Each structure stands twice: as structure tokens, then as C-alpha cells.
Image (spheres, helix red, strand yellow):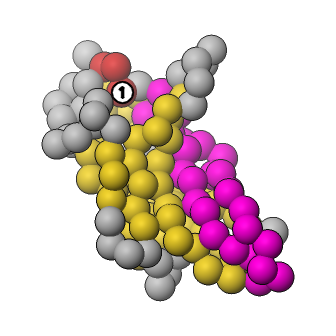
Amino acid sequence: QVQLVESGGGLVRPGGSLRLSCVASGKIGGLYAMGWYRQVVGRQREFIATSTNRDTTDYADSVKGRFTSSGDFVNKTVYLQLNSLELEDTTVYYCNAKGLETNGSPGQYWGQGTQITVYS
């Protein structure tokens, strides 16, 4: 089994910043992508960003220029720096990882989610 644990959510004013962290542990053979999604209640989970072990990162248009994802695949950690936060960024953020377990099985894994609330 593979577990992802997020940290760093909280309350922030519009225009403020937060930094999320996510650490993977368990029977990990190797990870090739780690990233972030968010989900508003009643809506589909939305892609935010993903970083790969080839040093590439992709972003959703809605967060380009404001959010920065960075992956440390040696330590199985991914970070999301959120700047210029807006009221519309309020929701639960989920860490995501893709890779292989020690038995060679491919998998996609999710964290438990961390709440970000932007309030005026």
C-alpha cells in the first residue's frame, strides 16, 4: 500500500499565500508523477498541477502564474506554492501520485485532502 499525507492548508486573506506539502510512503517501487487536484462539493475533481520525475510540470490555466508545483522524487515529496489566492480558490486540495509499487503493480494514489479557505 501507498499512503500520501498532505499538510499546509488553512485560512488566508485574498492575495495571500500558502504552501502545501505532500509526502508519499509505503510500498513504493518508484513514482513518476506527483501533483495536485482540488474539488468543490458537488463538482468533479479538478486538475491543478503535476510534476514528473523528468523535471516537467504542467498547470491548469486557472492557476498558471499563481501556483507553483515542485516535486522531490528522491524524498517522494511534492509541494504546491499558492500565491495571489482568490476567494474562488477556497476548497479541498488533494495530493496525487502515480507510480509502481514494490511488487511492480502500477497505481494512482490520493491523499486525504487539506482545506484551504480564502476569506475577506
Boundaries of the magenta span:
91-116
Residue at 79%, 72% in the rendered image: 105
Assign the magenta stretch its main secondary structure: strand
Q: Is residue 115 shown in magenta? A: yes
Can residue 8 be seen? no
Can residue 98 be seen? yes
Query: Would residue 104 be found to the left or right of residue 71 on screen?
Result: right
Query: Would residue 28 be found to the left or right of residue 60 on screen?
Result: right
Report the label total: 1
> Which amino acid is tagged 1?
Asp
Query: Would residue 116 be found to the left or right of residue 43 on screen?
Result: left
> Circle 1 sits on which residue?
89
Residue 99 in which image quadrant: bottom right
* SS at circle 1: helix
Residue at 33%, 59% in the rendered image: 57
Q: Position of residue 61 (x, y in %)?
A: 28, 34
Residue at 34%, 20% in the rendered image: 88
In terms of depth relative to the viewer, which is nearer, 102 or 72?
102
Q: Position of residue 110 (x, y in %)?
A: 65, 51
Residue at 63%, 52% in the rendered image: 111
Residue 64 in which image quadrant: top left
Q: Is residue 52 shown in magenta? A: no
In terms of depth relative to the viewer, which is nearer, 77 or 33?
33
Q: Position of residue 37 (x, y in %)?
A: 50, 41
**The N terminus, quarter of image:** bottom right
**The C terminus, quarter of image:** top left
In the rendered image, the vertical position of residue 105 relative to residue 112, given as above or below: below
